[in-house]
Amino acid sequence: MSHPTEPTIEAVIRTEALTKVYASKSGPSVTAVDHLDLGVRPGEIFGLLGPNGAGKTTTVGMLTTRVVPTSGRAWVGGVDVTADPVATKLMIGVVPQVSTLDRALSVWENLYFHGRYFGMGAREARRAADETLERFRLADRADAEILELSGGMAQRLMIARAILHRPRILFLDEPTAGLDPQSRLALWEVIGELHADGQTILLTTHYMEEADQLCDRVAIMDHGRILALDTPATLKRSLGADTEVRITPDGGRVQDMAHHLERFDGAQGVSATDGVVRVYLRDGKTGLARLIAHADAGGFGITDVGITEPSLEAVFINLTGKDLRE
């Protein structure tokens, strides 16, 4: 597995010791991002995965000029973000967590005036707005008001607007948060199409399935630091297990059971979170029955057992001992 601070060749996004500390009048200062070293390659979807408060949004804020770093440096497309924020803005597209669509304009007008803002002539902006609406399957809503759109449609429009001026890098901050499963899958398809066209995308998410499905590489973050960085497949293989067993003990003896199962031959890792003991087995086919017998021999009753393949959440729990959704 790659070291978290491994430099990236030909990085289109690069940071060196990038740090953001928020001062507090009522208590100690808060370090949101802590000496972040990062490299994103051209044409890849790079994911920042972590729980709320991990520092993902602050990282995107510093890379897109919205947040001023406390220390460290960042380059986007070879441009120093802090030294030349105007040049940076011209080469990026940003989709923040909160909708910034202009409710006083129609769907088409949101795209048209965005193009004009980025220096397009009237004819070019009209053509770009028409083509982009077709591409994002929103042409039939061109004259609609923003408030008439569903959550999924509004998010598609946000991404459509962000790529209208053909940015080198697209930043998506929690793009599917709050969407229903159907809208989320539709948005995954849109992001996949952009990726197929060679668009570089930096994506933040706390959905492990989203990172696994979309990202070429993933950095797992917590408390402003990168804990692990690699492809989703390599990160999952780093557990050395092919099966994740989730056991709910009778009587709530979670920690006691976890300590007992740590001594089980074949367990690659054991964690206890949210009333559940997770055991990572290197051979789930033959090890499950022996694991249950081992728990029974320790005097532990079991109310529920679940089996799945190791996930990015399992990697995070193995690194931090806590649930990724916290």
Image (cartoon, grey):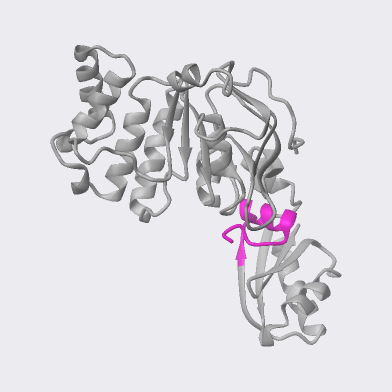
The answer to whether any part of residue 30 appears in the image is yes
Residue 13 at x, y percent in the picture: 59, 25
Question: Which residue shows up at 76% across the image and 76% down it?
Answer: 255
Q: Is residue 15 visible?
A: no
Name the residue at the left extreme: 143
Image quarter of the C terminus: bottom right
In front here: 139 or 114?
Answer: 114
Assign the N terminus to one quadrant of the image: top right
Using the rendered view, name the quadrant where residue 21 is placed.
top right
Residue at x 75% of width, y 85% of height: 300
- Reply yes or no: does residue 324 show up in magenta: yes
In this rendering, position of residue 41 left or right of residue 271: left
**Residue 293's image quarter?**
bottom right
Task: Choose between 253 and 78: the one closer to the eye.
Answer: 78
238 in magenta: no
Residue 272 appears left or right of 193: right
Please give the count of numbered marks on the rendered protein: 0
Q: In the shown orientation, is residue 90 left or right of residue 204? A: left
**Which residues make up the magenta segment?**
307-326
Percent coordinates x, y for residue 70 in the rendering: 66, 35
Q: Position of residue 2 (x, y in %)?
A: 75, 35
Q: Residue at x 58, y 23 (%)?
A: 82
Residue 19 in the image: above or below residue 236: above
Q: Is residue 23 above or below residue 244?
A: above
- In the foreground, 216 or 321: 321
> Could you tell whether 188 is left or right of 255 in the image?
left
Residue 319 position (above or below residue 122): below
What's the residue at 83%, 68% (across, down)?
A: 262
Compared with 127, 296 (above or below) is below
- The answer to which of 277 and 29 lies nearer the viewer is 29
- The image position of residue 241, as x and y in percent, is 73, 55
